[in-house]
Image (tube, rainbow, N blue to C red):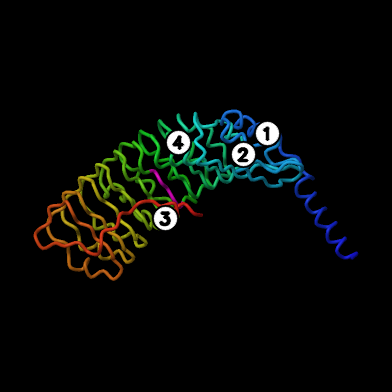
């Protein structure tokens, strides 16, 4: 009986130390309450009390994760998604300097991302997909040196893709598809050592693949390259064989031309090759058909010579929710 009482006392003390020993940093309390005031009733109903980290009697606010830092608690994650938030990007977010994850996806946020986003030096995951954000991507995002996941797809961003994104050494996943970006894809992105997935499909981009991979050792870790539904021209360069980790090459619906080089068969892990709806000509080398891992090669809507056939069953390559699990 005494043992049970001691165990219960230890548990209560542990809970007290976890929830009650530290105050939430005033900076974060102020910022979250400003965000609360700007977001509207859809979120506010779940945000009870003044302390976003909870005050012992009340739990932390929904979507808010806090951690102890010395004598204080700080907000480290903010996830408020799919609740139809309407209005501009909440600028007070940029005062949450200990954030590692910011997820506001699938809302109705408008306007620009403020340049103050560059203050969030600890941020690893920034997910703003499926909103109505506009204007250009602020180059200050390039100051988020710990960022690993950047999701800005399905918005109304325009202008050029900032080359400052190449300053993100830890970036692994870059999703920019379904926007209104124009100009050329910065070849500097090829210098990101850990980049695995680059999706710039469904924009208004121009240029050639040769320009994109013009630097020696470009895209050393890249597995998936989505360039579909833009205005890219030129051919498929043999230098693509240097992307030895590439598994998906999605070039559909551009204005590319020329023949398909046999060097493509030297991409050792290539699994999906989408060439459809371009201006390609000639024949496809037999070595590509014999590639040991190539499952699908889609060629519809080109000017290949008779006898050129697809390989495998065409599969629509769309970004599923499972691609966002991390």
Label 4 and label 1: CA atoms lie apart by 25 Å
Most extreme residue toward the left is 306
Disc 2, SS: loop
Considering the numbered disc 3 on the image, is that residue within a helix, a strand or a loop? loop
Q: On the picture, is 238 further left or further right than 165?
A: left
Specify the label residue 196 is tagged with: 3
Place of residue 225 in the rendered image (x, y in percent of width and height, measured from the top left)? 34, 53
Q: Do the CB atoms of the residues marked 2 and 4 lie less than 8 Å apart?
A: no
Residue 50 picture quarter: top right
Label 4 packing within 10 angstroms: few (<14), some (14-19), many (20+): some
Secondary structure under badge 1?
helix
Q: Which residue is mark 1?
A: 27
Precedes in sequence: disc 4 or disc 3: 4
Q: Using the rendered view, name the quadrant where residue 196 is placed.
A: bottom left
- Looking at the image, is 312 positioned above or below residue 217? below
Tell me, yes or no, whether the highlighted magenta stretch contains residue 173.
yes
Name the side, left or right, on which 30 lies relative to 214.
Answer: right
State yes or no: discs 2 and 1 in contact (Cβ < 8 Å). Answer: yes
Q: Which residues are magenta?
A: 172-176
Image-based side of 260 in relation to 187, left or right: left
Q: Nearer the viewer, mark 2 or mark 4?
A: 2
- Circle 4 is placed at which residue position? 139
Say which of marks 4 and 3 sits in front.
3
Q: 21 or 63, which lies in front?
A: 63
Q: Residue at x 57, y 42 (%)?
A: 121
Q: CA distance from mark 2 to mark 3?
A: 27 Å
Q: Main secondary structure of the magenta part?
A: strand
Pointer 2 residue: 97
Q: Position of residue 115 (x, y in %)?
A: 50, 32
């Amino acid at each position: 009986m005494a043992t049970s009482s001691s165990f219960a006392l230890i548990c209560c003390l542990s809970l007290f130390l976890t929830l009650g020993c530290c105050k939430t940093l005033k900076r974060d309390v102020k910022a979250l309450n400003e965000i609360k005031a700007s977001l509207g009733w859809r979120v506010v109903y779940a945000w009870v009390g003044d302390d976003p980290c909870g005050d012992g009697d009340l739990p932390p606010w929904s979507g808010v994760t806090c951690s102890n830092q010395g004598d204080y608690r700080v907000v480290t994650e903010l996830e408020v998604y799919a609740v139809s938030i309407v209005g501009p990007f909440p600028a007070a977010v940029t005062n949450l300097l200990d954030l590692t994850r910011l997820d506001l996806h699938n809302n109705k946020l408008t306007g620009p991302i403020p340049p103050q986003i560059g203050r969030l030096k600890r941020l690893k995951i920034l997910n703003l997909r499926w909103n109505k954000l506009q204007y250009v991507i602020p180059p200050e995002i390039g100051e988020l040196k710990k960022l690993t996941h950047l999701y800005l797809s399905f918005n109304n961003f325009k202008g050029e893709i900032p080359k400052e994104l190449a300053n993100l050494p830890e970036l692994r996943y870059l999703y920019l598809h379904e926007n209104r970006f124009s100009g050329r894809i910065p070849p500097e992105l090829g210098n990101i050592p850990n980049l695995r997935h680059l999706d710039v499909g469904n924009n208004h981009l121009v240029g050639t693949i040769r320009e994109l991979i013009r630097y020696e050792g470009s895209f050393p870790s890249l597995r998936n390259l989505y360039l579909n539904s833009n205005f890219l021209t030129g051919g498929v360069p043999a230098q693509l064989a240097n992307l030895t980790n590439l598994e998906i090459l999605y070039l559909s619906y551009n204005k590319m031309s020329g023949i398909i080089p046999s060097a493509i068969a030297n991409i050792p892990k290539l699994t999906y090759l989408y060439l459809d709806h371009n201006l390609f000509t000639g024949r496809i080398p037999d070595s590509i058909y014999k590639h040991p891992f190539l499952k699908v090669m889609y060629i519809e809507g080109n000017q290949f010579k008779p006898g050129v056939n697809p390989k495998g069953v065409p599969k629509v390559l769309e970004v599923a929710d499972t691609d966002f699990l991390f």
